[in-house]
């Protein structure tokens, strides 16, 4: 029904545009160029308006039909699908956390190796104790800063995981009857 009305709207827009174009041709044949330009502009506006309105209404109808189709699905099926999406989201979050932990451990090992290398060089070059102490504190400070940055990064991904799961939980609560 709505699709038919939409087609009628489009046909009306095309007819209006055709009428403006025919009137423009007549005024041009009569030697009235200023009225011709006005009619051509009105025809272009009518055509643009009709197409724009057709697209907007068609898009809204498609969205409405998709929502109706979704509502016809059994609630258990929708719940299973949402549950699967939540499980996949949680698995992705767990995978990201594992990768972050491995990255942090890798960076920690690199930092420890760097500290060990610095200490070895200090011994080999017989750097005085003050300079060696300054060097060690610098390396430890950089390591602590890197560990803090990685810790913040892990918390950030954890928070994103939580924020991603909350809308899904809300959708489950909205779509599951009896809650």
Image: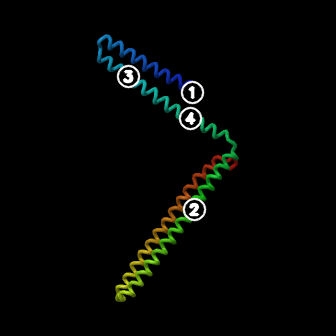
Q: Please rate how many residues cluster around mark 4, counting C-alpha atoms within 10 Å: few if below 14, some from 14 to 19, many from 20.
A: few
Q: Nearer the viewer, mark 2 or mark 1?
A: 2
Q: Which residue is mark 1?
A: 3
Q: Quadrant of residue 164?
A: bottom right
At which x and y percent is residue 52?
45, 30
Task: Identify the image quadrant of the N terminus.
Answer: top right
Q: In terms of sequence position, does the residue under pointer 2 or pointer 4 come before the other? A: 4
At which x and y percent is residue 112?
47, 78
At which x and y percent is residue 169?
61, 53
Q: Do the numbered discs 3 and 2 sit on residues whose CB atoms are within 8 Å?
A: no
Which residue is at a point 56% across and 35% down the rendered structure image?
A: 62
Q: Gap between marks 4 and 3, in whole Å?
A: 30 Å
Secondary structure type for disc 4: helix
Q: Do the numbered discs 2 and 1 sit on residues whose CB atoms are within 8 Å?
A: no
Q: Quadrant of residue 117?
A: bottom left
Q: Which residue is mark 2?
A: 95
- Tag of residue 42: 3
Q: Please rate how many residues cluster around mark 1, counting C-alpha atoms within 10 Å: few if below 14, some from 14 to 19, many from 20.
A: few
- Tag of residue 62: 4
Q: In terms of sequence position, does the residue under pointer 2 or pointer 1 come before the other? A: 1
- Tag of residue 97: none
Considering every residue shown, the one lying at the far top of the view is 30
């Amino acid at each position: 029904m709505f699709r038919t009305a939409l087609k009628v709207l489009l046909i009306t827009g095309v007819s209006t545009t055709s009428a403006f174009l025919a009137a423009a041709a007549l005024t041009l044949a009569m030697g009235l160029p200023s009225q011709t330009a006005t009619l051509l502009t009105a025809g272009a506006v009518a055509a643009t308006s009709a197409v724009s309105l057709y697209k907007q209404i068609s898009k809204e109808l498609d969205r409405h039909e998709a929502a109706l189709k979704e509502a016809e699905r059994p609630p258990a099926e929708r719940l299973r699908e949402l549950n699967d999406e939540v499980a996949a989201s949680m698995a992705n979050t767990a995978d990201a956390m594992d990768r972050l932990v491995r990255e942090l451990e890798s960076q920690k090992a690199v930092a420890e190796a760097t500290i060990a290398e610095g200490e070895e060089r200090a011994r080999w070059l017989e750097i005085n104790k003050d300079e060696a102490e300054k060097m060690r504190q610098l390396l430890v400070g950089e390591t602590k800063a890197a560990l803090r940055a990685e810790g913040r990064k892990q918390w950030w991904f954890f928070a994103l995981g939580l924020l991603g799961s909350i809308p899904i939980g809300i959708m489950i609560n909205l779509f599951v009857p009896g809650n």
